[in-house]
Image (spheres, rainbow, N blue to C red):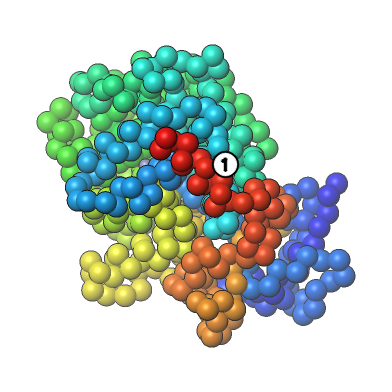
Amino acid sequence: MTKRTYWLEHAWLDTHVEPGVAVDTADGRITAVHQDVDTPPPGAEILRGLTLPGLANAHSHAFHRALRSTVQVGSGTFWTWREVMYSFADKLTPETYHALARAVYAEMALAGITSVGEFHYVHHAPGGTPYADPNAMGEALIAAAADAGIRITLLDTAYLSAGFGEAPNTHQLRFSDGSAEAWAERCSVLKERDHARIGAAVHSVRAVPAAQLATVARWAEERRAPLHVHLSEQTAENDACLAAHGCTPTRLLADHGVLGPRTTGVHNTHLTDEDIALLGSSSTGTCMCPTTERDLADGIGPAAALQNAGSPLSLGSDSHAVIDLLEEARAMELNERLRTRTRGHWTAAALLRAASADGHAALGWDEAGTIEAGALADLTTIALDSVRTAGPLPRLGAETAVFAATAADVRHTIVGGRHVVRDGAHTLVPDVPQALARAVEALRA
Ligand SMILES: [Zn+2]
């Protein structure tokens, strides 16, 4: 049994900052939390700054990292951005995707992220031919997370159509298994590991015919696995759904058994009052991706109304325009301030809960995201002495972390009791910028 004690100069204990906390761990779990420990116990690992529970990035498409900056040139919409995205998706192989995802997940670890929800739909070779191992791409992502030292929930995504009643286009052929039954058969072969869980996703109501939604929902229900779905990110999706089915995407999902407490709608941007009530009353979660939503000019989703209706909130960096969960957290609040011209819709504590405990729950890691006995020993330490964070009282550490710190202030990231980032350096991937540069270059070539 591997036992280790950490001494936290300041610890975020869900409601307040506690100075001087010793955290005992054994085999990757927290066994005890001791308060009022003024000096580090002998042999303890010292974590200076404010230690939070590990952060959960609840929505990722790892390969979108290759688009960074390329998609900032010129004008356009979500739909023009998507054409550039497809040109990169066309070039992925299990090898190049592994190299890119390993580097991207290492970037996430450096940003204090201990778990990622990978919304994965590039399943087959270009043209749609399955690889010798039909899950070669998913396995590449699971291996990449292990190499980068973080947890992953592989949200294996059903993507079967280009739009309502439309066959997949050339780019989308490699996303499609042909039917939800074939999707389920392929996913059922994927095995969970210590660091990896398997969940399901419906790409969107555009990409899975209504008659096949229940097959995906049932697969997740039988396994009690998380089920994610892109929902009403664009008004064009709502218009097309109304034309095809006479109802909103949320109503369509509700009618086909997709909503529920293990389901998370991603974006949930353009909703009616009835949609909000349906999501809230079914305890369906909402994953907001504010840096992507603003980057893609999607709009501002009604996060506060959704939470008030009963939808738990999580956060994701989605297209990885930037990878910074602290920025996602503050952006959700700041978007709401701009819209309403009032301040303080969420406390820093509530925003941290979305970035940690509730994000982990959305990914099926219910035992992560808190600093308490029994929880996974996943910790993220934010420097309180950097140029951005110096000055405020330590008891305002949560406010400092959410409203002033960035990913650059993450000093330590610990996953399952292992120091994945120590003093701002990744311990498993020696040169993360170089790994990113090489992996992106390989796709650009
Ligand atoms: Zn997405």
Q: Residue at x 75, y 69 (%)?
A: 46
Ligand 1 - quadrant of the structure image = top left
**Is 356 situated above or below 338?**
above
In this figure, what is the number of numbered marks?
A: 1
Name, please, the residue furthest toward the front.
445
Quadrant location, the C terminus: top left
Whole-percent x, y for residue 142 in the image? 58, 34
Residue 80, by quadrant, is top left
Q: Residues within 10 Å of mark 1 (few under 14, many from 20)?
A: many
Whole-percent x, y for residue 199 in the image? 50, 33
Q: Residue at x 72, y 52 (%)?
A: 418
Residue 257, by quadrant, is top left
Q: Is residue 186 left or right of residue 444?
A: right
**Is 411 situated above or below 214?**
below
Whole-percent x, y for residue 168 in the image? 28, 21
Say if disc 1 is inside 8 Å of ligand 1: no
Whole-percent x, y for residue 224 in the image? 52, 33
Residue toward you, 141 or 98: 98
Secondary structure beneath dot 1 equals: helix
Pointer 1: what residue?
A: 102
Observer able to see residue 224: no
Q: Residue at x 59, y 78 (%)?
A: 385
Residue 43, by quadrant, is bottom right
**Is 131 situated above or below 221?**
above
Name, please, the residue furthest toward the left.
243
Q: Residue at x 32, y 33 (%)?
A: 86
Residue type beneath disc 1? Arg
Residue toward you, 58 or 302: 58
Q: Is residue 144 left or right of residue 267?
A: right
Observer able to see residue 385: yes
